[in-house]
Amino acid sequence: MSRSRLHLTVAAVIYYEGRFLFVEERDKLSGKRVLNQPAGHMEEDEDIISAVCREVLEETGLALMPMAWLGISQLKASNSHTYVRLNFLFEPDQLPDVYQAQDSDILALHWLSRAELAAQAIPVRSQLVTDALDCYLQGTRLPLTLIQPLC
């Protein structure tokens, strides 16, 4: 596989008062609206924790820190690219009254339970979205200390 088809990404499962935060965006291939967790590619010379915090801030306007790691998901997409996704858990005690995405690609923010997500007319971006939720709902909580700092 060409390295140009391998993508290292981070994603945030943000859980607050019984609901998960999703971003609504357009799929770059189909142009259709989809739901995703705040997520994106790591930048060059960026450590993993900084990457997921940056994505959360850009896509939601929230400055949060993860409390746990939910593991790694992998996807071989229809475009023949492989996505390796590191999933993190955020469970804030409180949120600001007003926050909004800084990234113009984000169309809206949605707080949904797992059942509400399943009933949504807007589909999830990929199986990676529900895989991360299932890890959370199954009780997966890996300590952030398992991730060594960038040397």
Image (tube, grey):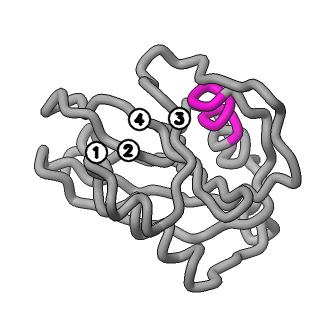
Q: Name the residue under label 2.
A: 35
Seen at 76% across and 47% down, the residue is 151
Residue ranking furthest to the right: 93
Q: Nearer the viewer, residue 82 or 90?
A: 90
Q: Work out how far the residue at label 1 is from the one at label 4, CA to CA, in angstroms.
A: 8 Å
What secondary structure is found at the residue carrying circle 3? strand
Q: Which residue is painted at 71% across and 47% down in the image?
A: 49
As measured in the structure, the alpha-carbon distance from the residue carrying label 4 to the one carrying label 2 is 5 Å
Label for residue 24?
A: 4
Residue 116 falls within the magenta-colored stretch:
no
Q: What residue type is labelled 4?
A: Glu
Q: Over which residues does the magenta segment extend?
A: 53-60
Label 3: few (<14), some (14–19) or many (≥20) C-alpha neighbours in 10 Å: many
Between discs 3 and 2, the one toward the N terminus: 2
Residue type at the position of mark 3: Leu
The residue pinned by badge 3 equals: 109
Q: Which residue is drawn at 27% across and 38% down?
A: 4
| Disc 1 residue crowd, few under 14, some 14–19, many 20+, Cα 10 Å | few
Q: Disc 4 on helix, strand or loop? A: strand
**Vertical order, 131 against 48 (above or below):** below
Q: Is residue 42 left or right of residue 47?
A: left
CB contact under 8 Å: marks 2 and 1: yes
Query: Could you tell me the amino acid type at mark 1?
Result: Ile
On the image, which quarter does residue 102 sit in? top right
